[in-house]
Image (cartoon, rainbow, N blue to C red):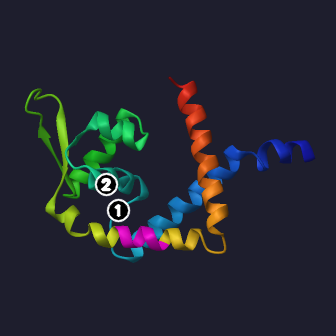
Amino acid sequence: MEEFKQVIDASIGYLVGRTSRAIIRRLSKKFADAGFDVSYEQWSVLIHLYRKDGQTQQELSVTSVKDKAAITRLINILEKKNLVLRIPGQNDKRSKQVYLTHKAKAFRDELVAVVEDLLMEAEAGISHTEMDACKATLNKIFQNFEQLNQ
């Protein structure tokens, strides 16, 4: 049983997954409490458009680390909520550029404030040194998998 606990309960995969689910639940609640009809998954697309508006679905798929089908579903939902719109590309009409609407741009700062508040909650009681080491380690793990997937 101790071996099982070490392999499963103490594994980096389990710990990261559990933490990720806790973050998703908390952020979804914070968005709802603040009056925003935006899920964590939708936020993961919006944030990339806030950084660079007018991306293709392919670009969003790569930057958000989601498959094409998931991005298509998320963009469809965001379009129905009048948060994004798709405009055919100038060179290739089949390739659509995804842009934020005025509505999405208007509450950007409020959404970011909710996320910043969540991050403060997450980092409570953790030193800057511990957070820096945690982030560096997680980035190394991600890079290991990225290299294996190439």
* Residue 92 position within the rendered picture, expressed as x and y whole percent measured from the top left: 12, 26
Question: Left of 118 or right of it: where is 32?
Answer: left
| Amino acid found under the numbered disc labelled 2 | Leu
Residue appearing at x 39%, y 59% in the figure? 39
Q: Quadrant of residue 72?
A: top left
Question: Is the C-beta separation of discs 1 and 2 under 8 Å?
Answer: yes
Q: Do we see residue 1 in this rendering?
A: no
Which numbered marker is on residue 46? 2
* Residue 88 position within the rendered picture, expressed as x and y whole percent measured from the top left: 11, 36
Is the residue marked by circle 2 packed among few (<14), some (14-19), or many (20+) residues within 10 Å? many
Q: Write down the residue under mark 1.
A: 38
* Residue 144 position within the rendered picture, expressed as x and y whole percent measured from the top left: 60, 33
Question: Left of 147 or right of it: where is 68?
Answer: left
Q: Residue furthest front?
A: 129
* Residue 65 position within the rendered picture, expressed as x and y whole percent measured from the top left: 43, 40
Q: Residue furthest left?
A: 90
